[in-house]
Image (cartoon, rainbow, N blue to C red):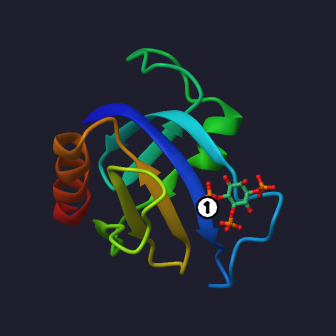
Amino acid sequence: KHGVLTRKSHADMDGKRTPRGRRGWKKFYAVLKGMILYLQKDEYKPDADISEVDLKNAVRIHHALATPASDYSKKPNVLKLKTSDWRVFLLQAPSEEEMMSWIFRINLV
Ligand code: I3P
């Protein structure tokens, strides 16, 4: 699955709240491949190598949990992704249907 997702980091690997200055929203082209959610700067190109930056932004979603971010009301269609290493991301999808589709696909892994 792939599509545009806008990401906000809410908690870091130590489980602590992401500090100010690193809490902004950033738009990515998301690609779910195997157990990894790649958050790429540019649109998916099947044959291109994954860049260093894109690798850094990749999220392992094995044992992760995605749910609608019902406690976040500033933006619509936002899901909350909790990873097995205690990170928490908010991910905004372009529509509710897309949000539900991402949640379903992430939780299937
Ligand atoms: C954050 C940025 C986010 C905002 C966040 C700020 O600043 O303005 O858009 O989240 O508020 O800390 P920075 O880019 O300097 O990290 P919202 O869009 O959800 O308001 P927060 O600290 O209350 O999460």
**Could you tell whether 41 is left or right of 93 in the image?**
right
Q: Position of residue 98 (x, y in %)?
A: 22, 41
Which quarter of the rendered picture does the C terminus lie within?
Answer: bottom left
In this picture, residue 8 sits left or right of residue 21: left
- Which residue is drawn at the image coordinates 71% and 71% (left, top)? 18
Q: Residue at x 36, y 50 (%)?
A: 76
Whole-percent x, y for residue 106 in the image: 26, 58
What residue does disc 1 label?
9
In the figure, 102 relative to 81: above or below?
Answer: above
Specify few, some or many for label 1: CA neighbours under 10 Å numbering under 14, 14-19, or 20 or more: many
Q: Name the side, left or right, on which 24 lies relative to 69.
A: right
Please, is residue 49 above or below residue 73 in the view? above
Q: Quadrant of ligand 1?
A: bottom right
Q: Secondary structure at mark 1?
A: strand
Instruction: Single out the residue that lies furthest toward the bottom.
Output: 15
1 vs 68, nearest the viewer? 68
Q: Residue 17 placed where, x, y %?
A: 68, 79
In which quadrant will I find the N terminus? top left
Examine the image and state in which quarter residue 55 appears: top right
Q: In this orientation, which residue lies closer to the viewer: 9 or 95?
A: 95
| Above or below 34: residue 27 | above
What residue is drawn where x is 69% and y is 37%? 53
Q: Amino acid at mark 1?
A: Ser
**Beta carbon at label 1 within 8 Å of ligand 1:** no
| Quadrant in the picture for residue 97 | top left
Q: Residue 28 at x, y = what percent?
A: 52, 34
Near-viewer residue (65 or 95): 95
**What residue do we see at 58% from left, 55% from top?**
8
- Single out the residue that lies furthest toward the right: 21
